[in-house]
Image (tube, helix red, strand yellow):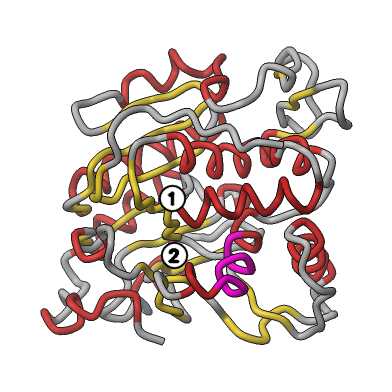
Amino acid sequence: MPLNVAKAGPETNAVALLTPTYARDVELCALLCESVDRHVGAFSKHYLLVPDCDLLLFSRFESERRSVLPASRFLPGWLRPLPPIVQRKRRQYWWSFRAMPVSGWHVQQILKIAATIALPHRRYCILDSDVVFFRDFDLSRYEYPGSIPLLSIPGKVTANQPGHARWVETSHRLLGLPAPTLPAADYIGHIIFWDQQATRAMAAKLEAASNLDWIDALCRTREFSEYMLYGYFVQNDASFAGRHTPSLRTGCVSYWDPPRLDKAELNRLLRGADQDDVAFSAASFSGTPVQMIRAAIEETRAQLRPRAATKQTAGLGAC
């Protein structure tokens, strides 16, 4: 089936920021936007991708350099949101006659791919709502046609991680690659960079392997990771692998798991940031209060020694 590419205008070489988000994360998103405006330089546009019903809630973030876009702009007409009253574990779902309903988490992954394909930028930096910057971060060195970082942690995924292992297997199946062996590489992290042409080629590969529209193929797949898909596609395509520099880190101090952090733990994590770290993320499902994160960032910002100029130039591309 042909890949649907709806361009929004002439392509630009500067990096654009993408953040899929929704109502429950609005205060986290506010903190992200504040930190982007304060610390992130040389990006072309910051896009917030939200369910149509949340457009009004997020309209306050609109600015000259930030746009709030409805999910329906990037989703096919056959995939529609269920009414907000129909939720499970406070998650919104989308339905169709082609597959079982998909959760908002799945739709956010689809939106990252669809927006990267359709918006007029050659390079994207993907930031979830729970990322907050505490150091300056210059994106000019990642403009097209230069190389961009590809988070790649060899051997991290093992049989002891059944969820990640399934994402590895699903990525290979969806891309028509040979069955993987474990341990395998992990590509999941924060501050992730994608190349538009590579993403379009990945979507075309999904369609060729499944004989379905790529969104249809992902809706019929219960467990997948968009970052795993991109990573394994690039790893197995020499022409696109050359546009990426493998990196073991993304420059983001991360906390993934419940329970919520207390202030002392949060400050300890931030004090542990090294000179290449520019941001912090406590996954939204950890339940760490937004105001606590805001206060900790403000308290520790001045204490964190600025990165040396040589380090800043080297950036995230080094292993």
Q: Quadrant of residue 23?
A: top right
- Nearest the eye: 43 or 207: 207
Q: Quadrant of residue 33?
A: top left
The verdict on residue 235 being magenta is yes
- Nearest the eye: 190 or 273: 190
**For the residues carrying marks 1 and 2, which lies nearer the camera in this image?**
1
Look at 84% across and 69% down and name the residue there: 162
Q: In the rendered view, does 222 fall on the left or right side of 195? A: right
Look at 29% across and 51% down and name the residue there: 15
Pinpoint residue 308: horizontal percent, then vertical percent.
14, 81
Q: Assign the C terminus to one quadrant of the image.
A: bottom left
Per the image, the residue denoted by label 2 is 266
Per the image, the residue denoted by label 1 is 196
Q: In the rendered view, does 197 fall on the left or right side of 39? A: right
Depicted 160 relative to depicted 28: above or below? below
Q: How many marks?
A: 2
Pinpoint residue 249: horizontal percent, then vertical percent.
44, 77
